[in-house]
Each structure stands twice: as structure tokens, then as C-alpha cells.
């Protein structure tokens, strides 16, 4: 029996787990609506990238089969369409149930077909006053070219005919971008979405026509842009190339059409034909096509505290003293931060200190994604302006952050930072910072290695780890990495860091092989976002056959199916989907004296292990290694937000035996309590969240 699952279908199972949160009655009602929104945005990106690339493959290499389940692109697309149709039906049920619950709090999504005369008059007057002057009407017929449909934008389509003719044509009404996404009745929480109002009042826009039928639809385009090697001309700025490619993305081939409701067959057929979308990728749903109106609902409901998660603020780490230089503290002892439970401000403090410290000669950093209002960028700019030698590798190919990173690269250059880009064939995905200090002839390092991006916003939403160390060998390894990057090459070997693409996967294989030699006494624990690398899956299966106990926490895609007799029966896989996005990567090999613990930027995906620059760092301090292992073990014990992957390929919630443990809330409780029991009192923390008692506040939401 095969122990492989298909990558795309496994991802859809992950998004189904996200959608399950929308049905969880232990989750506050508005937060359940937020999970519907996350499900939808996840699915949008899936179609733009994964489905788009499968359509490309089906066209240029239709006989090619993926290397795990042996499915062709066409077979995968067929399975995807079937699965997505089922998930959309579930999403519609979730939306209906949640909105029914919100109506008890005065917020109600009205039905256009059930408006009272007074309600109808209000929306029609709003349309004439606020919307009609901004509307652009388009036609699709022999005399008019098909208008360009923007990716992800909502449109109203109308089957229309002139009053003196019997032949029908098709009219288009784009939804103006600068209008509110939802319109509320006066002094009421009852609303219609802007596209519903336009559709309802379309007759006023096509005043010379009779409207036969109308529909609301949205188009998703392929966004899987690739970089032609020929573009890597040394006379052309790579940043200019990326700017052109980002613009190109907006015009790629449509891969999906979504309808809200049931369009008439002629309209659906016309759009399918003119956009050249496969019929199996035309989806009808009973809930809104876009959830971009949620912030308006949130403002209406913000006083209803029971509808939202209790506020939690990242805490001042108890291991860090405010009164002592952070650089000095790191030189004395390694420091580990655990986001979002602890504050990223301590990392920013390190950069600010480095910018001012007279002994700091250089700062080098890899930037993949940063916040739009980034204090980290400000610190790097300040360091350069203070005369420090600052090097920033800005990865311009960070998907959907290309424009953001292009802008930051220009700002960094203007401040005097030496900016370089990723390698021609490899994205630089590592989270690596190297601060070099000189005191006379002595050279020392502060190195930081993280599992997540240098992004203040996501540090409050994603679980991530960051290690800050003064270890000389780790610093020397980091220096080798940056030297290679500046020379547009990759690292051949390092002493302590594991560096992809040449020195991470091979070392992981060696560590697994070492556990195989111990048989039933062997132990492997891995926490990652995705597991797709076939070589590593095979190696883990080999270890299982040798009797090694293997525990995996895999949030998203997992192409390894555990529990298959004589293959993966010694492997257990869980996935945690909760309030925060599980994002930290942890590798643990062995126990007791031979235990090796790493944190890393790399998932066990071929793209990470072979086609990116990634870094894994050993956690050498025993107390910190114990802490990382405790993080992993706590995740494995989660019986509130954890699901276990079964041998049939399906996930089920972990049985709630004994006391309930929500691992994410447990870590917040720990951070709050540690902050209370230290000289760095909560009243002095950057979060400034003192409206507790802590224990009561957190225990109320322990589920």
C-alpha cells in the first residue's frame, strides 16, 4: 500500500481544516467568519499559483506525471475541481450559519429578493446618487472587444437586448474600486454588498435595453510568473525585470470563473468561451465571491466583545533585561524568542543597538518579506547613515511581495545600504542576520537565525522562533554564507549551520541515518509547514521500517501518509490549525546526550531543500534546546486544535482525553506568567497590555 498523498489534494485538505474552524462553536462568532475569509484567500492563491502551473504543464507536457501518486496534470486538475466544488458547498453553509448568528447582534445580510419597499427605495436612491455616476458600462458582441477582467475583481454581467430587437447581447458593469464594499440601511446593521446593489439596479445603467437576466461573477487568473534565464542580462537591472513581470502577472490566462448564484446558461457559456476557461473550473456559490467587506462588519460589531478573541499582546521575554545592552546579554548567553507570545521589539532593539554601537563595523541581513511600515528597514537605514557597512539581500521574487520589496530596495539604496538580490536560479529564503563587531584587533559576531520573516505584523500572527547567539563558529558560518551571496554563489560547506541547497538536505539525511542505527531506540521529531520532498519522505519511511519513533507536526501539505503497516507505522503526523498560523520549523534528532536540536527557515519541500538558500541553526544551549523540545512536545499534546493524519489519508480531531490543551494559548499563558514573575514587569513591556488579571484572562479562552 502506497504511503504517498498528492501535493495539491493534501493542500486542499489543509484548507478544509481551516474551514472547519468556521464551524467550531468554541470559536467566537466573528472569528469564525474570519476563518471563512482565510479559506477564501487561501483558495484564491492556490488557483493563481498551483492550478495555474498545472494548466501550464497540461499544455506543454501533458504526459508528465508527478513523482508520488503518478498523476498527470489533467488528472490532478480533475480531482482538484471535484474537491473544490465540495468545499465551496461547505463554505456556503458556514457563511449562512455565521450570518444567521450575527443577526442576533443586529448585523444582517439582506436578500435582494426580500427587500421591503422602503429598503428597496433606499438602495435604489443610493445607487442613483453614489454609484451610477462612477459606473462604466461595457458590451460583449461582434462590434465590441471583450473587456479585460481584472484578477479577483467582481463584475456584474447582464443579458440584455434593445427594446426594438430580439437579439441579445451581454453587458458588463465593473464594481468601482473606490466605493464601500457594503452599504448599510440608516441606523441599522442590515446591509447589501455593493455588487448586489449594482446588479439589482442594473436597469438604470442599461436604460436603453431590456434586461433578460443578470449575474455576479469573478475571474481568477494564473499568477505563476517565471523568470526567463535570458532576462538575466548583466546590462539590465533585475529590479526592472521584476517590475515588468509583476505587471505581466495581471494579464495572464484566466483559470477560474466564480458565479454568485445561478447565472443563466447563455451568460455562463459566453464567459466560459470568451475567457477560455474549462467548464469544470466554473464554480457557482451561494455566498459572496469576496470577503473584503468584513472590516465594515467588524466596526459595527466591535463593542460586542464576545464575538471576538480576547486580545493577547506579545510579552517582554523574561530572559531579557531592559537595563543591560542586548548585545552584551547575547555575548553572555544565547537568547531564544518565541513569536507571537514574545515581542519582536527585542529583535528591533538589537538592530537599533547595532546601528549606534561604535564597535559594530557591519550588519548583513537577508530580507524576504517585511512589513509595509517596517521598523527593521528604518534601523538598517539608520545604521547606514551612521557609517556602518550595511548589506541587505532583498529577495525580489517573494511571491506577491515583489512590488513591496522593490520599493524597499530603492529606499535602502537611498540610505546608503548596499543592496543585492537573490541568485539567478535560487530564491534566498533564509532568515539570517550577521552583526560584526571590532574591538581593536578582536573580531566577534552576533548571529540571528529565524524561522519566520522580519515582519512586525506577521510576528503577531505567526508562531516563529528566533535564535540570537555570539557563537564564533556560527558567526563564521554566517559570514561564509554572506560572502557567497555577494559573489552570486552558494555555500559548499559549513561547520555548524546547515545551508541549502548543498549542505542542508544531505546533513538531514545523515542525521536520520544515524537514528536508523539505533532502531527502536531512535527518535526523530520534525515541525514544519509542508512535507513534499520525496527523498526525505523515503528516508523517514526507511527509519520507520527500522523501528525509529517519528513524530511530525506538519501544518499544511503532507505527502507522507502515516500508519501504513511495514512502511510508516512508526510515524505519527498531526496538524495544528488555530488562532495563529503555525510557522516555526524545528528539527530534533535523538534523545538525551545525543540529542541534536535545530531551528530553520526550511520546510521539507524540494523547492526549499534544493532550489533555495535556506539556513538551519543548531540550538547549542541546553536550556534553550530543552525549551524548543518542550514547544514541540506541547504541540504533540494539543487536543483542542490538533488533527491527526490517519492511514486512510484523512484527518480527524485528536480525542479530547484528559485536560484540554490548546498549545497556542498555553504558550501565551506561559509568556504572560513569565512576564509577571520578572523584574521586567508587564507595565513596562512594549505591549503595554496591563488590563488583566493574566491568569483569569487567558484561562477564559484556553480552548
Image (cartoon, rainbow, N blue to C red):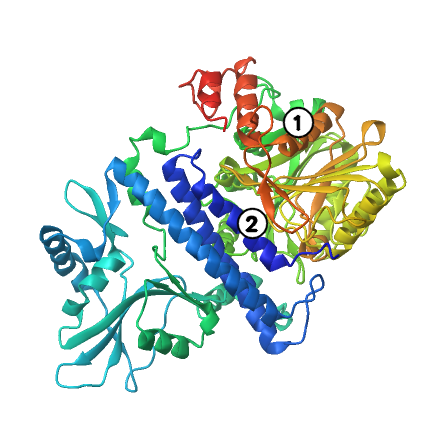
**Circle count:** 2
**Residue at x 56% of width, y 52% of height:** 13
Q: CA distance from mark 1 to mark 2?
A: 33 Å
Q: Position of residue 455 (x, y in %)?
A: 52, 41
Foreground residue among 131 and 227? 131
Foreground residue among 498 and 603? 603
Answer few, some or many: residues within 10 Å of disc 2's Cα (few below 14, many 20 plus, some between 14 and 19): many
Answer few, some or many: residues within 10 Å of disc 1's Cα (few below 14, many 20 plus, some between 14 and 19): many
Residue annotated with mark 2: 14
**Residue at x 42% of width, y 47% of height:** 36
Can residue 700 be seen here? The reply is yes
Res. 683 image quadrant: top left
Q: Secondary structure at mark 1?
A: strand
Mark nearest the camera among 1 and 2 is 2
Foreground residue among 297 and 147? 297
Dots 1, 2 in contact, CB < 8 A: no
Q: Position of residue 655 (x, y in %)?
A: 59, 34
Residue annotated with mark 1: 335
In-image side of 510 versus 458 (left or right): right
Q: Position of residue 179 (x, y in %)?
A: 25, 55
Foreground residue among 526 and 492? 526
Q: In the picture shown, does residue 580 fall above or below 611?
A: above
In-image side of 132 versus 613 (left or right): left
Question: Mark 2 or mark 1, which is nearer the start of the sequence?
Answer: 2
Can residue 358 be seen here? The reply is no
In-image side of 4 versus 96 (left or right): right
Amino acid at each position: 500500500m502506497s504511503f504517498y498523498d498528492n501535493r495539491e489534494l493534501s493542500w486542499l485538505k489543509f484548507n478544509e481544516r481551516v474551514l472547519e474552524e468556521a464551524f467550531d462553536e468554541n470559536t467566537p462568532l466573528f472569528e469564525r467568519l474570519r476563518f471563512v475569509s482565510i479559506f477564501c484567500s487561501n483558495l484564491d492563491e492556490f488557483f493563481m499559483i498551483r492550478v495555474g502551473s498545472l494548466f501550464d504543464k497540461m499544455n506543454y507536457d501533458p504526459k508528465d506525471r508527478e513523482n508520488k501518486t503518478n498523476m498527470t496534470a489533467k488528472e490532478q486538475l480533475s480531482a482538484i475541481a471535484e474537491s473544490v466544488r465540495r468545499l465551496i458547498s461547505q463554505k456556503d453553509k458556514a457563511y449562512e450559519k455565521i450570518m444567521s448568528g450575527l443577526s442576533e447582534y443586529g448585523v444582517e445580510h439582506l436578500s435582494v429578493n426580500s427587500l421591503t419597499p422602503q429598503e428597496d427605495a433606499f438602495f435604489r436612491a443610493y445607487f442613483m446618487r453614489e454609484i451610477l455616476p462612477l459606473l462604466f458600462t461595457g458590451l460583449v458582441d461582434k462590434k465590441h472587444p471583450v473587456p479585460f477582467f481584472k484578477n479577483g475583481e467582481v463584475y456584474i454581467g447582464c443579458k440584455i437586448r434593445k427594446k426594438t430587437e430580439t437579439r441579445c447581447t451581454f453587458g458588463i458593469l465593473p464594481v468601482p474600486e473606490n466605493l464601500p464594499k457594503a452599504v448599510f440601511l440608516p441606523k441599522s446593521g442590515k446591509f447589501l454588498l455593493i455588487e448586489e446593489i449594482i446588479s439589482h439596479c442594473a436597469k438604470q445603467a442599461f436604460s436603453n435595453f431590456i434586461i433578460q437576466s443578470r449575474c455576479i461573477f469573478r475571474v481568477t487568473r494564473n499568477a505563476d510568473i517565471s523568470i526567463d534565464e535570458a532576462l538575466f542580462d548583466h546590462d539590465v537591472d533585475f529590479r526592472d525585470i521584476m517590475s515588468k513581470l509583476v505587471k505581466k502577472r495581471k494579464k495572464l490566462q484566466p483559470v477560474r470563473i466564480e458565479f454568485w448564484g445561478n447565472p443563466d446558461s447563455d451568460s455562463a457559456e459566453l464567459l466560459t468561451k470568451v475567457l477560455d476557461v474549462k467548464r469544470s473550473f466554473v464554480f457557482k456559490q451561494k455566498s459572496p465571491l469576496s470577503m473584503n467587506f468584513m472590516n465594515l462588519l467588524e466596526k459595527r460589531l466591535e463593542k460586542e466583545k464576545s464575538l471576538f478573541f480576547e486580545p493577547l499582546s506579545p510579552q517582554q521575554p523574561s530572559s531579557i533585561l531592559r537595563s543591560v545592552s542586548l548585545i552584551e546579554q547575547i555575548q553572555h548567553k544565547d537568547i531564544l524568542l518565541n513569536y507571537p507570545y514574545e515581542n519582536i521589539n527585542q529583535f528591533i532593539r538589537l538592530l537599533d543597538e547595532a546601528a549606534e554601537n561604535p564597535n559594530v563595523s557591519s550588519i548583513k541581513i537577508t530580507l524576504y518579506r517585511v512589513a509595509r511600515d517596517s521598523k527593521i528597514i528604518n534601523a538598517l537605514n539608520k545604521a547606514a547613515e551612521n557609517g556602518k557597512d550595511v548589506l541587505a539581500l532583498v529577495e525580489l521574487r517573494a511571491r506577491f511581495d515583489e512590488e513591496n520589496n522593490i520599493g524597499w530596495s530603492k529606499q535602502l539604496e537611498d540610505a546608503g545600504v548596499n543592496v543585492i538580490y537573490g541568485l539567478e536560479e535560487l530564491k534566498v529564503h533564509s532568515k539570517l542576520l550577521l552583526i560584526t563587531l571590532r574591538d581593536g584587533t578582536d573580531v566577534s559576531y552576533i548571529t540571528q537565525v529565524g524561522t519566520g520573516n522580519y515582519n512586525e505584523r506577521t510576528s503577531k500572527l505567526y508562531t516563529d522562533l528566533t535564535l540570537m547567539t555570539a557563537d564564533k563558529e556560527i558567526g563564521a558560518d554566517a559570514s561564509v554564507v554572506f560572502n557567497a551571496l555577494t559573489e552570486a554563489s552558494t555555500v559548499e560547506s559549513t561547520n555548524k549551520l546547515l545551508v541549502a541547497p548543498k549542505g542542508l538536505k544531505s546533513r538531514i539525511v545523515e542525521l536520520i541515518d544515524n537514528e536508523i542505527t539505533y532502531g527502536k531506540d531512535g527518535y526523530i521529531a520534525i515541525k514544519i509547514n509542508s512535507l513534499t520532498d520525496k527523498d526525505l519522505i523515503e528516508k523517514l519511511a526507511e527509519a520507520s521500517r527500522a523501528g525509529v519513533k517519528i513524530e511530525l507536526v506538519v501544518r499544511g501539505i503532507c505527502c507522507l501518509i502515516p500508519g501504513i503497516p511495514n512502511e510508516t507505522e512508526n510515524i505519527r503526523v498531526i496538524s495544528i490549525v488555530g488562532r495563529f498560523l503555525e510557522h516555526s520549523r524545528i528539527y530534533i534528532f535523538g534523545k538525551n546526550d545525543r540529542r541534536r536540536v535545530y531551528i530553520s527557515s526550511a520546510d521539507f519541500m524540494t523547492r526549499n531543500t534544493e532550489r533555495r538558500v535556506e539556513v538551519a541553526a543548531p540550538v547549542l544551549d541546553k536550556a534553550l534546546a530543552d525549551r524548543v523540545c518542550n514547544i514541540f512536545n506541547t504541540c504533540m499534546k494539543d487536543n483542542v486544535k490538533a488533527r491527526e493524519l490517519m492511514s486512510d489519508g484523512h484527518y480527524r480531531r485528536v480525542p479530547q482525553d484528559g485536560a484540554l490543551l490548546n498549545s497556542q494559548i498555553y504558550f501565551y499563558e506561559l509568556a504572560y506568567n513569565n512576564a509577571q514573575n520578572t523584574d521586567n514587569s508587564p507595565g513596562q513591556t512594549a505591549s503595554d497590555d496591563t488590563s488583566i488579571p493574566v491568569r483569569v484572562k487567558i484561562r477564559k479562552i484556553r480552548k
